[in-house]
Image (cartoon, rainbow, N blue to C red):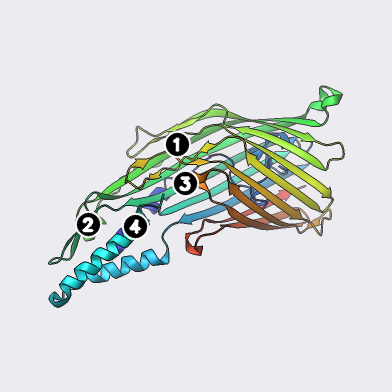
Amino acid sequence: MKRFIILLSVTVITLAFCAILSADGYRGLNSRAAGLGGAYVALGEGSLGAYYNPACLAGQKSFDLTIGITAKLDNYINNDMVDDFNDLSDLLKSNNPLTAANDYARALVLFNKIQNQVNPAPYLVNIEPDVAFGLRFANFGLYAASTNYVQGSAYLDTVALNTITNDIHAGTSYIAGVGIAVGEIGIGAGFNLGKLSEPLKCLDLGLNLKGIGGTSKNIRKSIDKNLDDFAKDDLEVDDIQMDNIEFSADLGLRYTSKDGKFIVGLSAKNLTSPKIDSSSETNGGIVKIKPSARIGICWKPFERITFVADADIIKNKTTISGIRNDGVYYANDIESQKAGIGLELRPFNWKRFDLPFRFGYQFSSSPSNSNDMITAGIGLKFLFIKIDVAAGIQDGMKYEEREKFINSNISLFW
């Protein structure tokens, strides 16, 4: 059974090379946002703020450049599952005829135990590596967002064990993998509506125009032979390329109170429902990126304290596929509707030095994707350089099964 784990790893690694660029909903590309539970639609400062809400570009001054990297891991392969695989593998290597009957019974028990852990899981491994770049000059911004999905799943059917050859023939069992890569490059601008009418001075309007492109790959292999031979099967994937490019737009609105302490933001992304069509490629597929909308608030009761909260207005369909309990491969069935809250403390908020501490919590109101996350972050600003780091871990479950992420940004500004 070690071969099974090796092959699943090969599948995920293969698909990782497919995952070049991607965009889906509101991702934690900005370390400040990630540390605040993903709540950034109202706050939205900096060059990457345009990704969350282009209206946040309005009123900003000077220049800043930001580069960010995020790595997220979510898996259902826990220590118990690995131990069971190893024990089953050791039994298959045994050639003692005196213990054959007991070995056969133990092997069936172990396989059924593994089956009960693998089949109910929506996936075994989910990896999401992201990269972001932002450039802002005054109220104009340019950004490139790269968010990726690589997922490995499995389904184990009934098993037939040959006690003479110690071979496993796993019926209609199979493993499956999906890699989705969709990238966006956007040019945005934010304007204060007070230039049109004095009563509208409290409102900012922003627009992103962007190009979206990427690729989608699916792999599925049946386990219908001796597992020792299974790992020799080819996993065919075409050369990675940008299959198509479509244009879309994001729209943002922001209200700021007269004293500047209370802000409400509203943002809508991917208004034209762009899609990635890789159906002409080997193991390719079609991914439709549906519109998403989010509302957020920001409250600054004191100069060094900021509270934020965001919530998705509509449910989003996730682009990642998976396997049902009955072994049916499906796509875009998992709904995601998230909300987040955050607190930022800035005890040293000076002009050329700052050391903010951030805490957040992100939760989902959709039962099909209820990954609640505890988040935290810290920043350091010194002279013209700013470094931000954030991390998060899923609330509940065993540690090895929890979703985890780490995010880092480095910025130059003046």
Which of marks 4 and 1 precedes in the sequence?
Answer: 4
Residue assigned mark 4: 116
**Residues at badges 4 and 3 in contact (C-beta under 8 Å)?**
no
Which of marks 3 and 4 precedes in the sequence?
Answer: 4
Q: Residues within 10 Å of mark 4 (few under 14, many from 20)?
A: few
Give whichever of 64, 149 is nearer the camera. 149
Q: Estimate the x, y position of residue 131 in percent, counting from the top left.
A: 56, 48
Q: Estimate the x, y position of residue 259 in percent, counting from the top left.
A: 87, 40
**Disc on res. 228:** none
Which amino acid type is marked by label 2?
Val
Tell us which disc is closer to us: 1 or 2. Answer: 2
Q: Is residue 140 visible?
A: no
Which of marks 3 and 1 precedes in the sequence?
Answer: 3
Real-space CA distance between mark 4 and mark 3, rounded to the nearest whole angstrom? 26 Å
Q: Estimate the x, y position of residue 355 in percent, counting from the top left.
A: 76, 59
Real-space CA distance between mark 2 and mark 3, rounded to the nearest whole angstrom? 31 Å
Residue assigned mark 3: 149
**Residues at badges 1 and 4 in contact (C-beta under 8 Å)?**
no
Q: Secondary structure at mark 1?
A: loop
**Disc on res. 242:** 1
Q: Secondary structure at mark 3?
A: strand
Which amino acid type is marked by label 3?
Tyr
Q: Secondary structure at mark 4?
A: helix
